[in-house]
Amino acid sequence: MVFLVFATKTACRKKDAKGVDTMKKYVWLSLAVVGVIFIWGNSLQTAESSECFSELFACLAENILQFFNVHEYLFVLDHIVRKLAHFTEFALQGIFVYKALRAFKIHNSFKLAFIMGVFTAAVDETIQLFVSGRASQISDVILDSCGALVGVLVIYWWEKNR
């Protein structure tokens, strides 16, 4: 039954005047929008709830490292987990925005996706100025922008080499 529904939806896909699959355009656009909402939503969390969430992943990482006899302090892991989360969120956002721009046949998709990543990072850090216990850091804007750039570079390279 599920296969039938999927096959029907796939067969009914329409292409726009430029020959672009309409469904793909809106899937990439939706992922890009949801990505930004996720990023900014995380910035709206208080310091305490953000810290609890990242400590969960830091504890998981600590358990994995202890399994391999690598012992680190939790506060170091927490910092690394936070920075990796920022970088990964923005790398994914860079991919989603780039693919959405390409799906809509927008010129300079590479540059625009990166600029949108920098803009999202700047707004993200600005939001944190108004949240209890949070602080805004230029280094986070730079890290987030690098994440967006890496995401855009990876998907650009992938498309050129497949």
Image (spheres, rainbow, N blue to C red):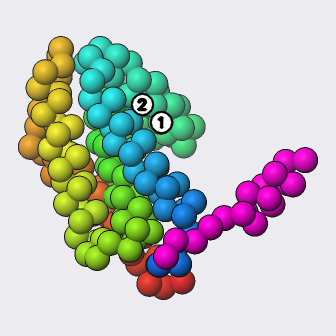
Residue at image mark 2: 58
Q: Do the residues labelled 1 and 2 touch (CB within 8 Å)?
A: yes
Mark 1: few/some/many CA within 10 Å (<14, 14-19, 20+): some
Q: In this view, does 130 lie to the left or right of 76?
A: left
Q: Which of 37 and 13 is in front in this view?
A: 13
In the image, residue 61 sits, relative to residue 17, either above or below, namely above
Q: Which mark is residue 61?
A: 1
- Left or right: residue 4 versus residue 153 is right
Amino acid marked by disc 1: Ala
Q: In this view, does 138 lie above or below 149?
A: above
Q: Where is residue 6 in the image (x, y as percent from the top left)?
A: 78, 55
Q: Residue at x 34, y 16 (%)?
A: 49
Residue 162 located left or right of residue 75: right
Q: Residue 4 falls in which quadrant of the image?
A: bottom right
Q: Where residue 51 sits in the image (x, y, percent)?
A: 32, 21
Q: Position of residue 152 (x, y in %)?
A: 34, 66
Disc 2 residue crowd, few under 14, some 14–19, many 20+, Cα 10 Å: many
Q: What segment is highlighted magenta in the picture?
A: 1-17
Query: Does the magenta portion include 73?
Result: no
The amino acid type, in three-letter code, at marker 2 is: Ala
Residue 8 in view in this figure = yes
Q: Which of 121 and 52 is in front in this view?
A: 121
Q: Is residue 142 above or below residue 13?
A: above
Q: Is residue 12 in the magenta section?
A: yes
